[in-house]
Image: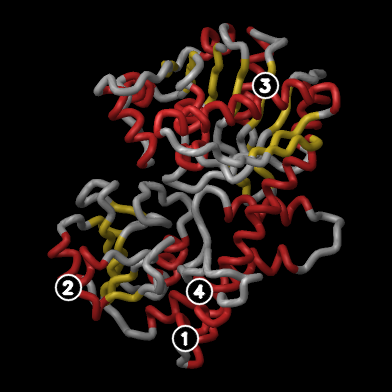
Amino acid sequence: MKITVAGVGYVGLSLAVLLAQNHDVTAITTTQSKAEMLNQFISPIQDDEIERFFKETREEKRKLNLHTTTDKEEAYKSAELVIIATPTNYDEENHFFDTSAVEDAIEWTLKVNPDVLMVIKSTIPVGYTESIREKYGIRNIIFSPEFLRESKALYDNLHPSRIVVGCDDEQRKEAQMFADLLLEGAREEEKRLNSSKQDIPVLLTHLTESEAIKLFANTYLAVRVSYFNELDTYAQSKGLDTQMIIDGVCMDPRIGPHYNNPSFGYGGYCLPKDTKQLLANYKGVPQTMIEAVVNSNSVRKEFIANQILSGNPKTVGVYRLTMKSNSDNFRASAIQDVMKHVKAKGIEIIIYEPTLDDGSEFLESEVINDLDSFKAESDIIIANRYDSDILGDVKDKVYTRDLFMRD
């Protein structure tokens, strides 16, 4: 099958690689330099499995039928299936996802290949797919939410916790076909490794319900992050041992010892925008908890900033802007808001971030990637995620809430 994937971020690129094991896949990017990198099987994003697959492809130990282009017309025209995985940023002013990139992909497809099945993988508001069907007078578009972790996107496609596809009754065959493609990609790696068959649940559901599943799932994760962060805020304020309390709480099997590591707040690609979008979708519907989760994240970041300021530093060093270990993404990372609170009090901030150029500026703060200089100039070093190999020699300077040393 000839498959076109619009977008080469975490979602689009991981899907393109997954499907290119068995099908001819064309990925679309608007950036020529990314197309050139990908056509040499060099990943523009940090993801261990994508990088492994690409290395094996370059060494001719693996075959991936993947080509990347900026030529939208040709890519959409030749497709037997179009997967739309373009970014949808949250518009703070209008309280809505900016879906313009999704609609650009839809319009190009309708222009050159109007009957092909389109599958939206981008995160969208509840009710969006039905509204698109009405806007363009089409039925050949369905939605499938993604449930991928940052920097582990291909791994999560190879080992999916579940596959959900939203459709209406007359498209269940097409929806099952798409689910089978994802299952096939996951099974391919099993065959290579001679491992046992995964039990992967598949849910075919209505269009709008599938959109709600995505937003409610991510908001539940935000609830859990916020809960343990507020537990930590209480423990710090009262001089209690946070880790001891969390260990005791999580012994309850209904709670469990997972996803419980405190942080400076939730951030990244999904949780901030998805919680705000779900809150916007609640307009006219009674709620208190969804709004509380959004507010809790802001309160947490203010608390962290005040804890840092209580040490009366002259210079605060920020170790990594990224949300997670082994990631190169710092979009909407919580540490940025902490920086803004601290900087507003007139405190100098310096940043160690290897993905940025040494000597450049970020949020009007200097990037210093010489570790010795960064450590020497910092009175306090703040780290959302702690790295003992790098920060162990200045442990007394470090402020972190990374108690379990994992994401």
Report if residue 8 is visible in the image.
Answer: no
Check disc 2 and report the residue beneath it. Answer: 393
Name the N-terminal-most of marks 2 and 3. Answer: 3
Check disc 1 and report the residue beneath it. Answer: 236
The span from disc 4 to disc 1 (Cα, nearest Å) is 14 Å
Could you say where residue 190 lies in the image, as x and y percent from the top left? 46, 33
| Callouts 2 and 3 close, C-beta under 8 Å | no
Check disc 3 and report the residue beneath it. Answer: 118
Q: Indicate the quadrant where residue 387 lies.
A: bottom left
Disc 4 versus disc 1: nearer the observer:
1
Q: Amino acid at mark 2?
A: Asp
Assign a secondary structure to mark 3: strand
Check disc 4 and report the residue beneath it. Answer: 302
Name the N-terminal-most of marks 4 and 1. Answer: 1
Assign a secondary structure to mark 4: helix
Q: Amino acid at mark 4?
A: Glu
The span from disc 1 to disc 2 (Cα, nearest Å) is 24 Å
Q: Please give left or right for residue 308 compared with residue 97 in the image.
A: left
Q: Indicate the quadrant where residue 309 lies.
A: bottom left
Q: Amino acid at mark 1?
A: Gln
Name the N-terminal-most of marks 1 and 2. Answer: 1
Q: Quadrant of the C terminus?
A: bottom left
